[in-house]
Image (spheres, grey):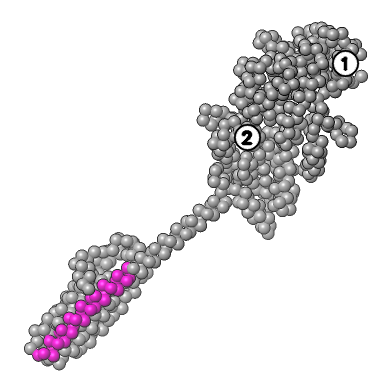
Amino acid sequence: MFNWLSELKSRRLPQSDAFLLEQYTTLRRQIPLMYALMFINVLFLGIESFRDVPFGMSFGIPILLSLAIMVRAFLWVRRRSFVAQPEQIRRYMRGTIITATLLSIVFGTWGSLLFSESEPIRSVSISLYVFVGAISCCFCLQALPSAGYLVLLFGVLPVTIRLFMASQWSLFSIGANFLIVAILILRTLATNHAGFKQVLQSRSDMLAEQKRAQAAELAAQKLAYRDPLTGLANRRALSERIDSFLSAHEPRGELYLLLLDLDLFKGVNDTYGHGAGDHLLKAVARRLGSIVEQTGEVYRLGGDEFAITLQSDESSNGVANTIADQLVREIAAPFSIGRFSHHISASIGVSCLPNDAASREELLQHADIAMYDAKSRGRSRHRMYAPSMGLALVARAELEREIRVDFGPDAFQPFYQPIVDLPSGRIVGFEMLARWRRANGTMGEPSRFIPIMEECGLIDELMLQLLEQACIDAESWSPELTIAINLSPVQFRDPGLAEKILAVLTRQGFPARRICFEITENTLIADATAARRIIESLKNQGVGLALDDFGTGFSSIQHLRMLPFDKLKIDRSFVHNADSDEAAYRMVAGIIRLAEGLKLSVVAEGVETASVQDTLKALGCQYAQGYLFGKAANASDTHELLKRMPPGHYNLPDQTIRSPRS
């Protein structure tokens, strides 16, 4: 019941800035009204006692009180025109408490003096004026109960004491009523103020909850439009960006979409784990962001697929081509993550609004088609969309369907191209090449179906199938003849590749020493660690190893030093004109001298003329293959070729050594 006493005793000012502001807002509305009521009470009280008391008490004190009231009222009215800071509000409230105390002391003392000077009837009227005035001011100060308590205490107490001291019972009873009402009012003030604080707390809690809800909504919106791994915008954000461009009434310029797919990323995931793959994706995202910067926006669509939008005010492909060129170069640079350096590349397809598409779906589809065209041309490049690409994609899809239908030993068979010892002209082995006899009787081009089988994941099964058939075909050959087999870079993603190959050789009882696997430098660059592990497993079983297309890669010398190669194969791009081009001649001569220094055999590919053959022999090249010595033939024709030669000699007959151009 007496909670107001502790409030009165402590007189603490609120600590919360929000609470202070609400108090101040309420007081700014109520205090001018309080001063107006106080002015009226002073005026009426002065008029009521004008004829009964000295002039100074009925005129001088009211004038002084009225001036003080007007000054304070003016200050509070003026404060409505500006926003106060918490420290100012605290200062205003301290001033209000002090002013209320002083005015209530003067008002209560003045009332007490008037009470003693007047007749009993007028004394009752004066005490009622004082009491009602103090209560009115007290209620106007509910937002600042400390000031209200002081006003009630100092404004009512002097008159109440006078009433209690009066000799008449009626005056004493009025004083008792004043005291009871004052106590009830004090409690009411305390209760109202507690309710006021509770309302403010509830409002504060509600606002905090609204802020939390807004923050949660913003976080959810961020998640909806951001990739959680890289922090880039996601597919949904890309869709809205394209739709925003399309919905513009007069879109300026063109919107280019660059669809980017990482080449060889799966190898990193498979070899080093998804943790390393995630770190690599983050590094790619940072590199893409640093390249594009203010010229466009970067998105991650999922997996290892990214997108970039560029808006240009010019009707030109220049900006998109420049950025795409830079992206291809930068992504091909090594990514150092932890103790490893990862080599990947990017294939990029570019489509444009409104030139290439009229809708978001078309834009994405055409960029995807252009990206696939870049992959089909050897990866690590970019391509602008052209309508002809769609037709090529349809043809590719049809070819893939046909490959899947035909896949099996009947349609896909090994063919064999002779490898010749140049000094003696003897056949020392064959390179096994995959051939596809299509359902219509034509032969499928390896340059077309091999890449598709690599992408479809069929190349592993095809190689093992052809290897098994080659072991069967070569069983009747001389044990001196070897078989060279190409391994695709894609196959090295399979950590069990060596075991699968050795299982086939064991099942057929075929000597491992008669097999020589040819790998390209791209295989080693993609994932040197995985390639080395597989190569060493095969070498431990006696399998031969040749580095194919030597001279076309990036770090051949390092690979020759690190891995146990037996042979180098000089790429046909250097061999076919070694007899007529000085640069090609020097390149071939340099490779042969390097191989001699490393004690490696050399095989020259693509020998088509006797002049090139003579040049290679003069340079000391040991082995060669090409159309000059024979095209790839099936097992039956190869068997007939070997049957026509004396056992152990296998010299090609003169009619076999011919140019395909003749």
| Magenta residue check for 500 | no
Q: Which residue is drawn at 68% across and 39% down?
A: 348
Q: Residue at x 71, y 27 (%)?
A: 488
Q: Determine if residue 560 is in view.
A: no
Look at the picture and state if 153 lies above or below 302. below
Q: How crowded is mark 2: few (under 14 residues within 10 Å), some or many (20 or more)?
A: many
Badge 2 is on which residue? 265
Q: Residue at x 76, y 28 (%)?
A: 465
* Secondary structure found at label 2: helix
Look at the picture and state if 493 lies above or below 193. above
- Decide whether the magenta segment is chiefly helix, strand or loop: helix
Q: Residue at x 61, y 26 (%)?
A: 530
Q: In which quarter of the image is the C terminus?
A: top right
Residue furthest left in the image: 167
Q: Determine if residue 238 is in view.
A: yes
Residue 454 in the image, given as x and y percentages of width and height: 72, 33
* Secondary structure found at label 1: helix
Instruction: Tell me the magenta residue range.
Output: 168-197
Front residue of this view, candidates 569 and 609: 569
Query: Taking 130 as reference, is 528 left or right?
Result: right
Badge 1 is on which residue? 641
Look at the picture and state if 218 lies above or below 443. below
Q: Disc 1 residue type? A: Leu
Instruction: Of the two numbered discs 2 and 1 on the same chain, state the one appearing first in sequence.
Output: 2
Q: Residues within 10 Å of mark 1 (few under 14, many from 20)?
A: some
Residue 486 in the image, given as x and y percentages of width and height: 73, 23
Q: Disc 2 residue type? A: Phe
Q: How far apart are marks 2 and 1 (CA)?
A: 45 Å
